[in-house]
Image: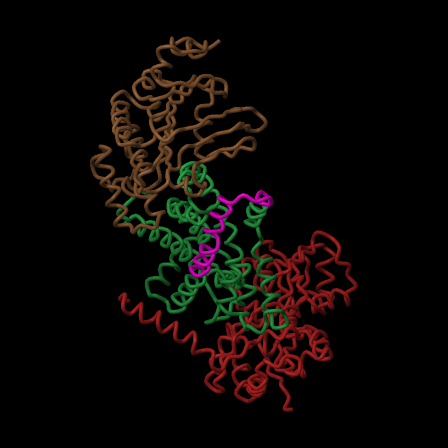
Chain colours: A brown, B green, C red
Amino acid sequence: MVASILPLSLDGVVLRKRGKHILGPVSLELGATGCTILLGPNGSGKTSLLRVMHGLERVREGRVGWAVPLEQARRKQAFVFQTPIVMRRSIVDCIAYPLLLDGQSRVAARAQAADMADRIGLHGDLTRPAFVLSGGEKQKMALARALVRAPELLFLDEPSANLDGRSTREIEAILHALKADGTRIVMSTHNVGQARRLADDVLFLNEGKIVESADTTTFFNHPATPEAQAHLKGDLIP
Amino acid sequence: MNDLWAGLAEALRLVLRLDPDLVEITLRSLQVTLTATAIAALIGLPLGAWLSVNRFRARRMVIALLNALMGLPPVVVGLIVYILLSRAGPFGVLGLLFTPTAMIVAQVIIITPIVASIAHQAIRDLWSEYHDLLISLHTTRAQRIKALLWDSRRALLTAALAGFGRAIGEVGAIMIVGGNIDHATRVLTTAIALETGKGNFALALGLGFVLIALAIAVNLALHMLTRTERSSQW
Amino acid sequence: MTPRNLLLSMAAFALTATFAQAETMKMAVTTSFANSGLADVILPEIAADTGIEVQLLIVGTGQALKLGEQGDVDAVLVHSRAAEEAFVDGGYGIHRREIMYNDFVIIGPNDDPAASGAADAATSALAAIASVEADFVSRGDDSGTHKMELRLWKSAGVDLEGDWYKAVGQGMGAALNTAAGMNAYILSDRASWLNFGNKGDLAIVFEGDPVLFNQYAYLPVNPELHAHVRNDLAQTLEGWLTSDRAAELINGYEIAGQQLFVFNAQPE
């Protein structure tokens, strides 16, 4: 039985960029199960927090600690960006890329990638260049790529922010299935409805700090802080 | 104006009857410049990629230096290579002076900065696109360079062709280190210089038109070859 | 030519390129000598008679002697006595062997505005050009031709100041091109002039003064200084260049019915 990379703990983490304060101090612990939604208005630091957790930003203050050594932890997580990063390759080669990094043969990697594309619901000729895909399809491809190495933890940064209704539904359906499968999900969104649909627990951020942290029922029915209350009502936070 | 028409006529005449001297110097031009381009690409393309993904203190200076080296006067390079390869010089024992090899060496020095600089620019743009993804996937530096080089291959081909273009028309350096020896180191550009010096403008122009046609042909051939790729558009 | 034939000729070219390294020697010669066209006549004869493929490096006199000093060539053929003697005295060459001479001529615009053709000596002809400040193109490259020109100016007592005197720093052909383009006067060796393809409005305006003599000498590079030079081949070539066969070819070489060189090698 392979050791879980979770829990993930952040301790007094502060992120500054070019002297400007972006995030923190933030302390939290992510348990081994469920779907955590980072909710908050634009500019509240959701994206930054996700990037810090995944190791895309280096912090000089505070600690980010996994249950296993960092090297091991990095292999078992994946990240889906708000705007999908599309490599200049065919669709199947894009999805297969992480497997090639692991040293798999091109043939085996492509087969596995094609299988994943099918399960995600990405159809059509996979040898087409990836840039011909629509926005929604690109995001599905990014998701397939993120899942192809069966990660234990999946980060998503506002994955459907730029997508239309139908694509959003399809992405959410995939996320529901992943939840059922036991994949740990940490996702940011500014869409309250989406948060409601997917969250097991919520971290509410404002101005770079975690203002409120609760399970989904508590948060949406009895938000404790005025900032959360305002945001849930659809008001701007004063 | 008469000279231009005479030049065109001369070019056609030389090509149509496949003048043996013309064939010889054309092949040698291709031999020298294609070899130099291949070597410059082997050095310059990975160098351009490496400079894009690596962060070190002197990086900005190295990139500025690389860009500046694009303006290296070829005749100065030729002079320096001559001094190095001369019998009285440090590498004289190699006996490379006045051989096509010496010409290749000089041209590699001249065009590698161009190839590296253009490659670096293209790859830097792609690197900023791929940055988050490649870091997220926990790639090693070598893996990043490999992915960037492969995915920017069209731009890299342009870089190599830019080097080729600079080299095929170069005459100052290879005149000095090659010596323009008949049947040994004479190429199209040095032959043009020689014939111009003799006042044989029609012949010089004819050779010039052949050179232009050659450069265009190589470019077209390479673009056609790469389009036969079945997979991606790039 | 079929593609197959083309491939075969390429292969042949590649092969001969390597094979040709058998008996080759490198000789630095001046642009004046090369432009005369004499080389194209005697090189094949040399190859046939001695088996030596002589590779010519066509440069200015100064560069030719420099190549000899560096040991980058096996022999030098130039026409600048003072520089040659310095070369030998410096130990770079074994000796200088006179081979042949041609003469210099003064070239200028057809209508000769300086009336240099009427002069009775080369120096006066040049003085005439200077006095009207007519455009004059000089080699300016320390070559044999250039040194001859400077000697003449000095004898004529002319001060080379002024826009009319243009030192281009190029070989004979390139300098002639410039003169043709400017319709200027220029000192040239007869051979280069006759063989020059872009005469424009220029013509010979002055010739015949014995002081315009141009002696070519052969300088084998000293093997004691540079052990790798093919002194054996250089000696064989010297023998050929001073032979009756060479005399026959050199004296017999004509352009437009005019003999260009006079063979004057002395037996050793």
| Magenta stretch: includes residue C133 | no
Does B127 appear above or below C192?
above
Outermost residue, bottom direction? C268
| Residue at the image point whose x is 39% and y is 72% from the top | C14
Q: Foreground: B193 or C261?
A: B193
| Rendering quarter of residue A190 | top left
Image side of residue A24 versus residue C156, left or right: left
Does C222 appear above or below A75?
below
| Magenta stretch: includes residue B42 | yes
| Residue at the image point whose x is 37% and y is 67% from the top | B19
Image side of residue A78 versus residue C239, left or right: left
Outermost residue, front direction? A1
Q: Foreground: B128 or C187?
A: B128
Which quadrant, please, contains the C terminus of chain C?
bottom right
In x, y percent, where is residue C88?
A: 70, 80
In x, y percent, where is residue B192?
A: 48, 61
Which quadrant, please, contains the N terminus of chain C?
bottom left
Q: Count of labels shown?
A: 0
Does A219 appear above or below A140?
above
Residue interval drawn in magenta: B33-61
Outermost residue, right direction? C157
In x, y percent, where is residue C108?
A: 62, 60
In x, y percent, where is residue A68?
A: 43, 40
What secondary structure do most residues of the magenta stretch adopt?
helix
Q: Foreground: A218 or B169?
A: A218
